[in-house]
Image (tube, rainbow, N blue to C red):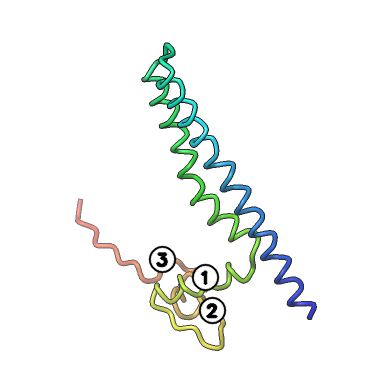
Amino acid sequence: QLRQARLHRQMLILMISSIMIFFVTTLPVNLRQIVGAYEVSTGQNTDINKIVSDTAILTVLLSLNYTINFYVHCLTSKLFRDEFIKIIYRLAGGITRNNTININHTIMPSVANGNAHTNIRHNQSPT
């Protein structure tokens, strides 16, 4: 029951942070579009280049929403981190057994032993 409460708390933090990031990254773009449309429709002396450059900058902020959410998920949820590592490991060709990842012996045994250059062969031409 304690584990389930901790999991619920992690999910709540994850949801609240995702919602806050969503509003912080999407609201400025929408507000600028509304203000720009209002300025153009009322016939005010508006600089279209400024509207376009502002929108371009804010669109970069908007696309950061997806990137930031990935890192927030990784930082706030151990369950997400564990599942993400399992997926990456499986995509790399490893097979997980008993939900554990043994990178040292399966993927890179020479690096795990402290000898990263064991399997590298050099063909040196005579000088």
Q: Which residue is mark 3?
A: 117
Decide which of 54, 105 is in the foreground and name it. 54
Residue type at tag 1: Ile
Q: Which residue is mark 2?
A: 101
Q: Earlier in the sequence, mark 2 or mark 1?
A: 1
Residue type at tag 3: His
Q: Which residue is mark 1?
A: 85
Q: Earlier in the sequence, mark 2 or mark 3?
A: 2
Q: Earlier in the sequence, mark 1 or mark 3?
A: 1
Q: Residue at x 48, y 31 (%)?
A: 34
Residue type at tag 2: Ile
Q: Is residue 101 above or below residue 33?
A: below
x and y percent of residue 67 in the render? 50, 50
| Marks 2 & 3, CB-CB < 8 Å contact | no
Report how many numbered discs are placed on residues in the image: 3
Q: Residue at x 46, y 24 (%)?
A: 38
| Marks 2 & 1, CB-CB < 8 Å contact | yes
Choose top left, top right, bottom left or bottom right for residue 83. bottom right
Q: Residue at x 52, y 87 (%)?
A: 97
| Marks 1 & 3, CB-CB < 8 Å contact | no
Hey, which residue is sitting farthest bottom in the picture?
98
Choose top left, top right, bottom left or bottom right for residue 28. top right
Q: What element does badge 2 sit on?
A: loop
